[in-house]
Image (cartoon, grey):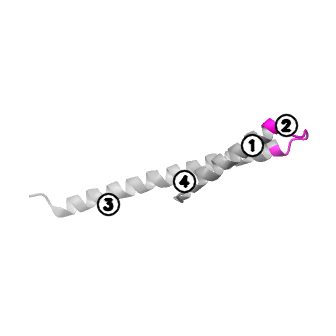
Amino acid sequence: MQDPYLYLAMALTTLAGVAIIAVTALRGWNGWLALKRAELNRRADDAAPPSAVARIEVADLKERIRKLEAIAAGVDL
């Protein structure tokens, strides 16, 4: 019979690894969302008034970002 502490150590190590990967992935996801937000703000600051198509596209992107943030936060839409 194997030592029960070996199983405990393996479980804790696996749990720590999954936690590290999850935190890293969430930080990357938040960074990507911040990049997209900055792109939207940069487009909004352009001198020329946006066309109707551009406004619809920006509104669509903002809605997508809102949904993605809700998914990242674990909120059920």
Q: Residue at x 89, y 40 (%)?
A: 49
Residue 56 falls within the magenta-colored stretch = no
The residues tagged by marks 4 and 2 sit, at their Cα atoms, a distance apart of: 30 Å
Which comes sooner in the sequence, label 3 or label 1? Answer: 3
Quadrant location, the C terminus: bottom right
Q: Secondary structure at mark 3?
A: helix
Question: Of helix, strand and loop, which one carries label 2?
Answer: loop
Whether residues under marks 4 and 2 lie with C-beta atoms below 8 angstroms apart, the answer is no
Q: Was residue 47 drawn as part of the magenta stretch in this picture?
A: yes
Q: Nearer the viewer, residue 42 or 53?
A: 53
Q: CA distance from mark 2 to mark 1?
A: 11 Å
Disc marking residue 12: 3
Q: Looking at the image, is 12 positioned above or below residue 53?
A: below
Q: Residues within 10 Å of mark 1 (few under 14, many from 20)?
A: some
In the rendered structure, which amino acid carries the disc numbered 2?
Answer: Ser
Distance Cα–Cα, label 4 vs label 3: 27 Å
Q: How would you rate the neighbour count of disc 3 (Cα within 10 Å): few for under 14, some for 14-19, many for 20 or more?
A: few
Q: Three-letter amino acid code at disc 4?
A: Ile
> Which secondary structure, mark 4?
helix
Residue type pointed to by label 3? Leu
Give the numbered dot on residue 71: 4
Report, in whole angstroms, how far the alpha carbon at label 3 lies from the one at label 2.
55 Å
Per the image, label 1 sits on a secondary structure element best described as helix
Q: Residues within 10 Å of mark 4 (few under 14, many from 20)?
A: few
Image height check: is 29 above or below 5?
above
Q: Amino acid at mark 1?
A: Val
Residue that label 2 marks: 51
Instruction: Choose the circle earlier in sequence order: 1 or 4.
Output: 1
